[in-house]
Image: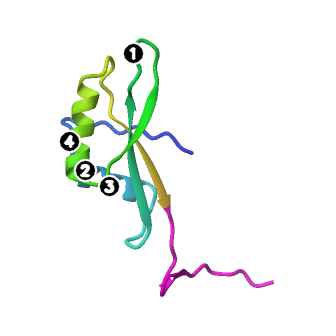
Amino acid sequence: MKDVTRMFKVAPYLHEIVECARSHFSCGVDDEISLKGRVDCGRGRAAYALVDLKTDVEWDQFKRLVEQASVPYLDVVVTSRKTTGREGDRELVPQLGT
């Protein structure tokens, strides 16, 4: 797992975060990518929960939640899975010859 910090002058749109993640992790068009926002939901003591960031509505709700936190910090967890090609529902993975 890598920690990557990106600074924006204004809060970015969800599609900008997705583009940034795809570019940074060299994801192809067909590669799967998942974004989750980390939210501090503790009172006094830190307790974190991950929320899905699949739509603009979820992204806007996440930003509003973070604005109310004691430390307003947009923390997004990106998970990517590379695919090389698909045939039906089966993933094709290149094999190395011996």
How packed is label 3: few (under 14 Cα within 10 Å), some, or many (20 or more)? some
Give the residue type that dot 3 points to.
Val
Give the label on residue 60, or none.
4
Pick whichever of labels 4 and 2 is earlier in the sequence. Answer: 2
Distance from Cα at disc 4 to Cα at disc 2: 9 Å
Q: Are marks 3 and 2 in contact (CB under 8 Å)?
A: yes
In the image, residue 57 lies in the stretch drawn in magenta: no
| Number of the front mark, 3 or 1 | 1
Distance from Cα at disc 4 to Cα at disc 3: 15 Å
Q: Which residue is mark 2?
A: 14
In the image, residue 87 lies in the stretch drawn in magenta: yes
Pick whichever of labels 4 and 3 is earlier in the sequence. Answer: 3
Please give the name of the residue rendered at 39% of the width and 46% of the height, measured from the top-left corner.
36
Give the label on residue 18, or none.
3
Residue 8, by quadrant, is: top left
Q: SS class of the residue under badge 3?
A: helix
Distance from Cα at disc 3 to Cα at disc 2: 6 Å
How packed is label 2: few (under 14 Cα within 10 Å), some, or many (20 or more)? some
Please give the name of the residue rendered at 57% of the width and 45% of the height, measured from the top-left corner.
1
Give the residue type that dot 1 points to.
Arg
| Number of the front mark, 4 or 1 | 1
Please give the name of the residue rendered at 25% of the width and 45% of the height, measured from the top-left corner.
59
> What is the residue that sits farthest to the top in this orientation?
44
- Span highlighted in magenta in the image: 81-98
| Number of the front mark, 4 or 3 | 4
How packed is label 1: few (under 14 Cα within 10 Å), some, or many (20 or more)? few
Instruction: Find residue 5 and report its horizontal and vertical position in percent.
Output: 40, 37
Drawn side of residue 58 relative to residue 41, left or right: left
Number of marks? 4
